[in-house]
Amino acid sequence: MTDVQDRGGQVRVGEELNVAAVDAWLKGHVPTLQGQPEITQFSGGASNWTYRLKYAGVEHGGDFILRRPPHGTKAKGAHDMGREYRVQKALKPLYPVVPTMIGLCEDEAVTGSEFYVMERIAGIIPRKNMPRGLQLDAATTRRLCMNVLDKLVELHQVDVQATGLDSLGKGSGYCKRQIDGWSERYIKAKTWNVPSYRYVMDWLKEHTPQDVANVVIHNDWRFDNVILAEQDPTRVIGVLDWEMATLGDPLMDLGNALAYWIHDDDNALLKATRRQPTHLPGMLRREEVVDYYLDKSGYKIDRRGAMGDWAFYEVYGLFRLAVIAQQIYYRYHHKQTRNPAFKHFWILVNYLDWRCKGLIKRAKS
């Protein structure tokens, strides 16, 4: 098989690590290391910076991932390295696909910010497209899809008390807090060229259900946050990016995941947003994903009625995605960033409003 492992590239200018300082700190945690690491950087992700540190001549335990926030951010805010580290460390004994944590550095003098290091899980990360050289038939792709969903179900079944993460969330009322919070964020980020979303926000508030459970949720569940075994690309061996993990409603987690679920026969605008290989023959369709998850998890929900049915969670996921896109566009609109990739995000925000309204109309019929 062609080498299909996910690998980093050259470290971006201005994002270099203090190699000597990081090396000294890491050897304090893994004394068997020798020499200095080869450092590469991963391009995926739009939040925290992620590096690979590979030591030569070490058969076991010489391959690591370092995560740190971008320059100019505070780790205690939106890029809390300590929180992300402790969540994974607590989950690992009960959810083995979490990477093994090596250590957390809270001394910003080492390389300019807090950071943590974990063991690298070598494997395949299915991004927008599967790696070149990896061809899966429809049956194999379907098995991969179901295995990824099974891992989401398994996460939602983790015993919260056994993890010690009881204080991670805020208790009951998660669904209501999300609708209130994302509505407030949208209003603050609105620009003249996007819709008010008032109809969508009002509908979500009117139809907010009680939480079906209070479990560990990932909050950013996508194919490009899982690692697959190189010898069996249907087997999930790692789950990454726990920055937004919390305790909350599992169906809200699924609704978020489906907002990124793009079919091959979706319209051109929607397909332009695709960032995972859900377009491949064999992948479950959105409605099949919901049925599969409900069957596996045991959660009961009326799939047909308008009140408290799946439509709420799907509209919520799309609305949340619209808010995220608008927050990014707001920064571009006000010249806080000049990244040309954000120039047309307002069009996506308009489209998502139309799509939310279509789902609401269908739920009422």
Image (cartoon, grey):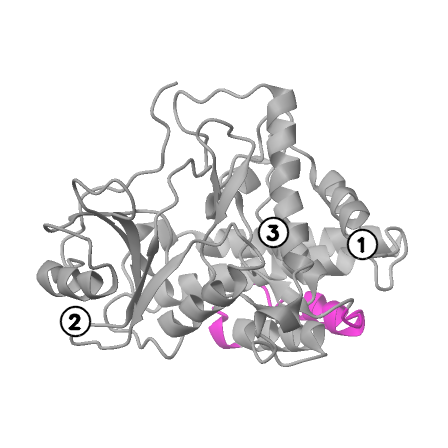
Using a 10 Å C-alpha cutoff, classify the residue at mark 1 as few (fewer than 14 neighbours), some (14 to 19) or many (20 or more).
Answer: few
Residue under numbered circle 1: 361
Residue under numbered circle 2: 110
| Closer to the camera in the image, 280 or 243 | 243
The kind of residue tagged 2 is Val
Q: Secondary structure at mark 2?
A: loop
Q: Is residue 56 visible?
A: yes
Find out whether the residues at labels 1 and 3 contact each other: C-beta distance under 8 Å. Answer: no
| Closer to the camera in the image, 288 or 168 | 168
Q: State the CA–CA distance, disc 1 to disc 2.
A: 55 Å
Using a 10 Å C-alpha cutoff, classify the residue at mark 3 as few (fewer than 14 neighbours), some (14 to 19) or many (20 or more).
Answer: many
Hey, which quadrant is residue 21 in on the image?
bottom left
Task: Magenta stretch: give its range.
Answer: 188-211
Residue under numbered circle 3: 257
Hey, which quadrant is residue 158 in on the image?
bottom right
Which residue: 65% across, 29% down?
142
Q: Earlier in the sequence, mark 3 or mark 2?
A: 2
Find out whether the residues at labels 1 and 2 contact each other: C-beta distance under 8 Å. Answer: no
Is 155 colored magenta in this rendering? no
The percent coordinates of residue 230 (x first, y second) are 44, 30
| Closer to the camera in the image, 35 or 78 | 35
Q: Secondary structure at mark 3?
A: helix
The kind of residue tagged 1 is Lys
Q: State the CA–CA distance, disc 1 to disc 3.
A: 22 Å
Q: Disc 1 vs disc 3: which is toward the camera? A: 3
Look at the picture and state if 280 lies above or below 322: above
The percent coordinates of residue 167 (x first, y second) are 58, 80
Q: Earlier in the sequence, mark 1 or mark 2?
A: 2
The tally of labels here is 3
Seen from this angle, which residue lies furthest front?
32
